């Protein structure tokens, strides 16, 4: 936005200045021609008259006075004089025309005679021809150097002004952008100044109010989550204790305990899904070691076979507990719904690799099973909360939040989550994170 505003203001200033110079040049062309022509004619006429009417013995002194006082030099015009063409500018043709109309068509003009630069005009006294040289400073407007100098100064000043105005205009927007980015990263931005133009003041005030309200919502959610965890799990614990003490058959006790465990798991899923991930708590996590530990723990399950291909020293910035919860959810999802056809075991492959160089390095984690996979038109439904596919409903004992929790946590970590069917059968879930 800054550069766009800067270039627009610069283009507007340049166009305006060009039009102004062109207009001034067109308007002043004729007056300048008249003024310079009159000056040349007057000087030549007066010099001609002074030399004609002065006594011969006083002409040397008169020429000395013209040089010292008026900057006018008179030389005899010789046939072998080295004469350069007159100055090449837009005024010269019209000046020559007017001067020749007054002094005669045989009047000559030159920019340099015998290597001496100046404004040279010829005139005659009787049969003798002379050169009259005026200093160039006396004849203004013959070149565009001054115009170019002033145009350069005005251009520099205009561009500096455009940069200042662009910065001033974009400062409130830059503040709002920085505050929004900080808030999106889980930080608490500084309160934006509620002053300036009405539009900026209203935008900053609305943003400040939004931040306060969202922080209040976050605080209320934390209180609610704590209340749910306490108020729901306490009765479940009491029910578990009563079941243990009750005189029930083994089958009934196991059924009730299974239901209580399932209810506790569902509550845990709700809490995991709603639990906020604080960016400020992110640390450097050795993802390679975390994946090895998680795979080792999952490998103890009797119905799971884990194979790993994990690169060493893969580090990311994040919350180790949340990342481990994500990997456990993926393994549990594969264990439940990715059972290998014709086998009682669930084969799960965990891979970790790194790609890119330096600041563009990425850590890629893949968790895949060897089951039947998911219909291609239903893959997008997997990440939606409280959603289970028809093939999984018969064996589901959760709330349908497993992959939704994964998606939510990875989004807070700034990671990419890709879900697709694996070649050869099964589901492949890929996580791409920025390397630390």
Image: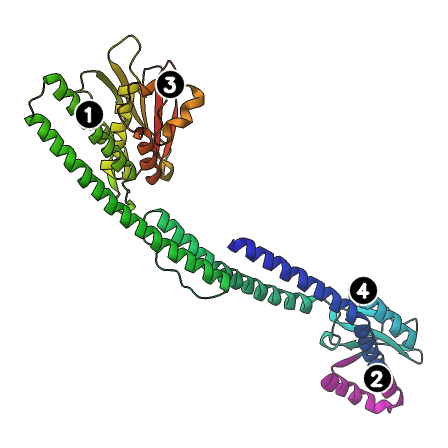
Query: Which of the 4 image quadrants contains residue 420?
Result: top left
In what element is the residue under mark 1? helix
Instruction: Please rate how many residues cluster around mark 3, counting C-alpha atoms within 10 Å: few if below 14, some from 14 to 19, many from 20.
Output: some
Q: Is residue 55 magenta?
A: yes
Label of residue 85 in the image? 4
Residue shown at the point (73%, 87%) measured from the top left: 69
Q: Quadrant of the C terminus?
A: top left
What main secondary structure does the magenta stretch of the protein show? helix
Image label count: 4
Looking at the image, residue 86 lies above or below residue 289: below
Q: CA distance from mark 2 to mark 1?
A: 123 Å
Residue tagged 3: 422
- Which region shows up in magenta? 47-73
Label of residue 259 in the image? 1
Looking at the image, residue 316 lies above or below residue 262: below
- Residue that extends furthest to the top in the rendered view of this protein: 342
Instruction: Please rate how many residues cluster around mark 2, counting C-alpha atoms within 10 Å: few if below 14, some from 14 to 19, many from 20.
Output: some
Label of residue 47 in the image? 2
Along the polypeptide, which appears first: circle 2 or circle 1? 2
Residue 214 rendering spot, x and y as whole percentages: 34, 51
Between label 2 and label 1, give the one nearer the viewer.
Answer: 1
Between label 1 and label 3, give the one nearer the viewer.
Answer: 1
Residue shown at the point (21%, 43%) measured from the top left: 227
Q: CA distance from mark 2 to mark 3?
A: 103 Å
Along the polypeptide, which appears first: circle 1 or circle 4? 4
Between label 1 and label 4, give the one nearer the viewer.
Answer: 1
Query: Which of the 4 image quadrants contains residue 417?
Result: top left
Residue 23 rendering spot, x and y as whole percentages: 75, 66
Along the polypeptide, which appears first: circle 2 or circle 4? 2
| Left or right of 378, for residue 322 | left
In what element is the residue under mark 2? helix
> Residue 44, can we see it?
yes
């Amino acid at each position: 936005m800054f550069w766009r505003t800067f270039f627009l203001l610069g283009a507007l200033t340049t166009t305006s200045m060009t039009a102004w110079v062109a207009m001034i040049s067109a308007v002043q062309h004729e007056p300048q021609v008249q003024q310079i022509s009159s000056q040349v004619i007057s000087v030549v006429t007066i010099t001609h008259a002074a030399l004609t009417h002065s006594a011969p013995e006083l002409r040397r002194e008169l020429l000395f006075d013209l040089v010292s006082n008026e900057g006018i030099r008179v030389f005899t015009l010789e046939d072998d004089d080295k004469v350069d063409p007159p100055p090449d500018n837009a005024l010269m043709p019209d000046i020559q025309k007017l001067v020749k109309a007054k002094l005669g068509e045989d009047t000559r003009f030159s920019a340099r005679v015998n290597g001496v630069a100046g404004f040279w005009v010829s005139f005659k006294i009787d049969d003798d021809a002379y050169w009259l040289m005026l200093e160039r400073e006396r004849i203004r407007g013959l070149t565009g150097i001054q115009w170019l100098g002033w145009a350069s100064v005005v251009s520099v000043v205009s561009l500096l002004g455009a940069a200042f105005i662009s910065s001033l205009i974009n400062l409130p927007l830059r503040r709002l952008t920085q505050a929004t980015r900080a808030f999106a990263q889980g930080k608490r931005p500084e309160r934006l100044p509620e002053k300036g133009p009405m539009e900026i003041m209203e935008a900053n005030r609305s943003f400040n109010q939004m931040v306060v309200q969202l922080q209040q919502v976050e605080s209320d959610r934390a209180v609610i989550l704590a209340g749910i965890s306490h108020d729901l799990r306490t009765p479940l614990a009491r029910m578990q204790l009563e079941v243990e003490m009750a005189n029930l058959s083994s089958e009934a006790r196991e059924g009730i305990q299974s239901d209580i465990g399932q209810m506790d798991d569902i509550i845990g899923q709700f809490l995991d899904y709603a639990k906020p991930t604080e960016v400020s708590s992110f640390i450097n996590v050795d993802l390679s070691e975390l994946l090895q530990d998680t795979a080792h723990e999952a490998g103890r399950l009797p119905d799971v076979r884990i194979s790993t291909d994990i690169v060493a020293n893969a580090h990311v910035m994040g919350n180790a507990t949340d990342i481990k919860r994500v990997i456990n959810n993926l393994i549990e999802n594969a264990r439940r719904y990715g059972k290998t056809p014709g086998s009682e075991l669930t084969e799960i492959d965990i891979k970790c690799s790194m790609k890119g160089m330096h600041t563009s390095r990425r850590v890629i984690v893949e968790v895949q099973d060897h089951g039947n996979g998911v219909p291609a038109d239903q893959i997008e439904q997997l990440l939606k909360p409280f959603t289970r596919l028809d093939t999984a409903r018969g064996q589901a004992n959760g709330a349908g939040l497993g992959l939704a929790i994964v998606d939510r946590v990875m989004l807070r970590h700034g990671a990419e989550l890709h879900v697709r069917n694996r070649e050869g059968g099964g589901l492949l879930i890929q996580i791409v994170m920025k390397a630390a």
